[in-house]
Image (tube, grey):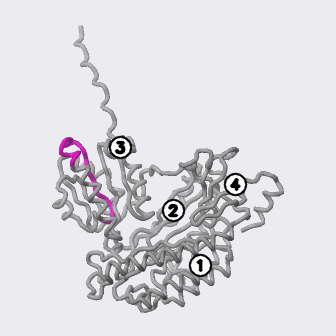
Amino acid sequence: MPPLAPAAHPPSPARRYAITTFGCQMNKADSERMAGILEAMGYRHEEDELAADLVIYNTCSIRDNAEQKVYSYLGRQVQRKRHNPHLTLVVAGCVAQQEGESLLRRVPELDLVMGPQHANRLGSLLEQVESGQQVVATAEHHILEDLAKPRRESTVTAWVNVIYGCNERCTYCVVPATRGREQSRTPQAIRSEIEALARQGYREITLLGQNIDAYGRDLPGITPSGRRRHTLTDLLHFVHDVEGIARIRFATSHPRYFTERLIAACAELPKVCEHFHIPFQSGDDQVLRHMARGYTVSRYRRIIRTVRQYMPEAAVSADAIVGSPGETEAQFQNTMALVEEIGFDQLNTAAYSPRPNTPAATRADQVSEAVKVDRLRRLNACAERCIRHRNQRYARRVVEVLTEGRNPKDPQQLMGRTRSNRLVFLPAAGHGLGDLVPVRIEAVRPFSLSGCSLSEPQEQRLLSGQR
């Protein structure tokens, strides 16, 4: 009689992971890629980070308050790990790159410290952790082409990285040190990813880069006319005809590289949305020189004027910093005047925050915190007035809205965005996610719109006449 086979052990439950993301769209895209890698490894997503077996903080170091928030979050996990040594703690992103091994000295309970260039290596790095190592991965590294399928937060819109890193040397900014040198993906790799997204039913893609207008300058090839063969403009033409994709966006632009050829392509290509995010940072030329931004206020004005000549209804958003070292009240007033003049549709504002190993942080003429807080308050009030005024142009108009999800505060409503990136709420009845819906705007608020959907054929034709 053959010996009995050993009793099968019940399968161990899948380990659960949680990722908390701080900062920019690039970080959000990195988190989606890391989540995809983890799920391919058999991990299961867990909403509650205090119940997860693997916790990743994907960090931002562009301002000090974002950095300090990470340490606050880590404190809770350190307490958990003292009672559960099998908990795996990971700090990824820009704080990890900036701090490196010093993070382990400050938080010795960490298992893995991993810079942004290593996001696609998460699987192999975790294998080192599981073998008993405490790992720091912050060395300069060629970013591997995306192989894992990201776990995307949306089923309608998707990020697509086109260029990593940044070669600029803005004196206040830590990004080149944390994200490394520019590295463009090939047009073929980008198009293949977009085609895969279209097959999965995605309707809108946003091309991402820390400095997206620099796309392609590290790729080989010159046209017979002497122009670079690979630019963002060429990439937009190359991916525009992917069937199933209804809208294309891109971010973030740099005024130094934002060309009329790019603007003309955006006006010509129907899928490219009329929304441009072009940070100006300061409305004063001397401050811009100290920032090493590489353009003047008049150059920035010309860009916006050209955008509006090609696309009068285009929305323009931007970033601005107050309280940079040496900024006078008169220079701050120049920023206020530029905001009033341009009339932004959205403005992201911040008080200057000294960052490690940046030239601006070593200057002796730092602006006091009280002055920075006051200037930020005044700029925010000015920006809100401008945004409120700009939003009034939508009242009673019919706009095309791509539905992206349910209103978390009212399940009877869907929410979506216009081509100009305005958030719109509309009744959910009769519509699904990913629908392009004509909506007549009935309520205008500073940061969102509400309206009713239109279904009559003649009203549908109203929409088709708009670009």
Looking at the image, residue 36 sits to the left or right of residue 201; the answer is left
Disc 2/disc 1 C-alpha distance (Å):
34 Å
Given residues 186 and 447, the one toward you in this image is 447
Q: In the rendered image, which residue does mark 1 sit on?
A: 343
Going from N to C along the chain, the mark reached first, 3 or 2, is: 3
Q: Is residue 285 magenta?
A: no
Disc 4/disc 1 C-alpha distance (Å):
27 Å
Count neighbours of disc 2 (C-alpha within 10 A) and say few if under 14, some if 14 to 19, many if 20 or more.
Answer: many
Residue 169 visible, this angle:
no
Q: In the rendered image of this protein, does residue 219 appear above or below residue 452?
A: below
Q: In the rendered image, which residue does mark 2 sit on?
A: 190
Q: Residue at x 72, y 68 (%)?
A: 467
Report the magenta residues as a range.
79-94
Residue 437, label in figure:
4
Going from N to C along the chain, the mark reached first, 2 or 4, is: 2
Count neighbours of disc 3 (C-alpha within 10 A) and say few if under 14, some if 14 to 19, many if 20 or more.
Answer: few
Count neighbours of disc 1 (C-alpha within 10 A) and say few if under 14, some if 14 to 19, many if 20 or more.
Answer: many
Q: Is label 4 or label 1 in front?
A: 1
Look at label 3 and name its amino acid. Answer: Met
Is label 3 in a helix, a strand or a loop?
loop
Disc 3/disc 2 C-alpha distance (Å):
24 Å
Looking at the image, residue 105 sits to the left or right of residue 197; the answer is left
Are the residues flagged by discs 4 and 1 in contact, CB closer than 8 Å?
no
Disc 2/disc 4 C-alpha distance (Å):
28 Å
Look at label 4 and name its amino acid. Answer: Val
Q: Is label 2 or label 1 in front?
A: 1
